[in-house]
Image (cartoon, rainbow, N blue to C red):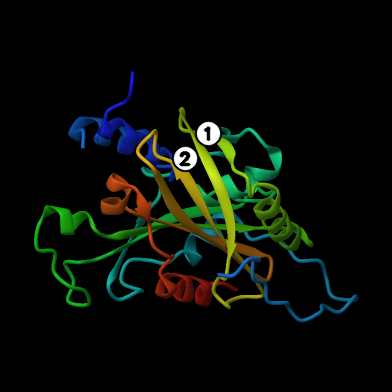
């Protein structure tokens, strides 16, 4: 028995690693480059002390706050993002860093992680006013995650993400917040030339028989901090199709805040 369009939308919301509260809301309304880009950082002196990871509390202070980016709203990710990696699983270990990056979770081995959401503010003077309900949902919401690592952990994390893009090109199975779906294809893209190193990729997601939707993710390292960006457009998500690129303004503003 086929699931309803509303159920398909909810399953796709799980791909964005949205919380059960968003999944419930869905059921209620029924409704390039061929290689990942990377910029090399300056070589560190062998005598320099090993990098120390920032704490979660320190990372939270580095997240974009409300009022810091004109035309966008920033909000806590507590109610819209999974609390831990245990809620996001793939059927291929090499693909785990990709799935975690799309969930604003640390793509590498660290407990220092903070996240929030940054959304277009169509009610502000900086963007066009919405003209109807469909237009009101035609906004980009970007899930932003920050994680920090000891020593060379951040560099190893970026390599794991880059390797995952190659290893998972043919797709993988994903379970997020209890909802299972299939990523059918992963393609490396040209990301923002920001920070010390960057990897970007797109993922095609099976919309439960209603075609595919393409989601875009960017991962940027600055020092021993890694920032992940994953964008969802709710109007596009309800129909399938391309979610659109991660807004450059969000990447620029967030990376600029990193130490």
Q: Disc 1 marks which residue?
A: 87
Are there few (<14), some (14-19), or many (20+) residues within 10 Å of tag 2? many
Considering every residue shown, the one lying at the far top of the view is 1
Q: With respect to residue 149, does 94 lie above or below?
A: above
SS state under label 1 = helix
Residue at the spot 66% in from the left edge and 66% down from the top edge: 35
Locate residue 186, reporting x and y percent: 58, 52
Q: Is residue 109 left or right of residue 180?
A: right
SS state under label 2 = loop
Q: Quadrant of the C terminus?
A: bottom right
Locate residue 32, reporting x and y percent: 55, 70
Task: Compare residues 87 and 27 and report the one nearer the observer.
Answer: 27
Locate residue 22, reporting x and y percent: 31, 39
Q: With respect to residue 99, does 32 lie above or below?
A: below
Locate residue 83, reporting x and y percent: 49, 39
Q: Disc 2 marks which residue?
A: 82
Q: Is residue 197 left or right of residue 145?
A: right
Residue at the spot 63% in from the left edge and 50% down from the top edge: 169
Are there few (<14), some (14-19), or many (20+) residues within 10 Å of tag 1? some
Q: Is residue 141 left or right of residue 177?
A: left
Q: Are marks 1 and 2 in contact (CB under 8 Å)?
A: yes
Circle nearer the N terminus (1, 2): 2
Residue 104, can we see it?
A: no
Task: Compare residues 151 and 198 and report the one nearer the observer.
Answer: 198
Q: Quadrant of the N terminus?
A: top left
Disc 1 and disc 2: Cα gap in Å? 6 Å
């Amino acid at each position: 028995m086929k699931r309803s369009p509303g159920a398909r939308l909810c399953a796709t919301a799980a791909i964005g690693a949205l919380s059960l509260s968003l999944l419930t809301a869905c059921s209620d309304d029924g409704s390039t480059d061929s290689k990942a880009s990377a910029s090399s950082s300056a070589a560190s002196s062998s005598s320099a002390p090993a990098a120390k990871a920032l704490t979660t509390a320190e990372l939270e202070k580095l997240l974009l706050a409300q009022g810091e980016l004109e035309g966008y709203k920033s909000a806590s990710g507590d109610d819209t993002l999974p609390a831990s990696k245990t809620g996001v699983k793939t059927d291929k270990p090499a693909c785990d860093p990709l799935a975690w990056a799309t969930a604003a979770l640390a793509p590498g081995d660290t407990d220092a992680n903070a996240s929030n959401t940054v959304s277009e503010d169509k009610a502000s003077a900086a963007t066009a006013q919405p003209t109807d309900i469909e237009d009101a949902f035609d906004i980009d919401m970007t899930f932003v995650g920050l994680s920090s690592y000891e020593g060379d952990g951040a560099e190893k994390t970026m390599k794991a993400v880059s390797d995952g893009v190659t290893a998972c090109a043919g797709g993988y199975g994903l379970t997020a917040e209890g909802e299972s779906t299939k990523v059918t294809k992963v393609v490396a893209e040209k990301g923002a030339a920001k920070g010390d190193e960057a990897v970007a990729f797109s993922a095609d997601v099976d919309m439960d028989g209603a075609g595919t939707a393409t989601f875009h993710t960017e991962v940027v390292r600055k020092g021993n901090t890694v920032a992940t960006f994953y964008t969802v457009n709710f109007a596009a998500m309800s129909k399938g199709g391309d979610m659109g690129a991660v807004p450059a303004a969000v990447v620029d503003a967030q990376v600029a805040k990193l130490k």
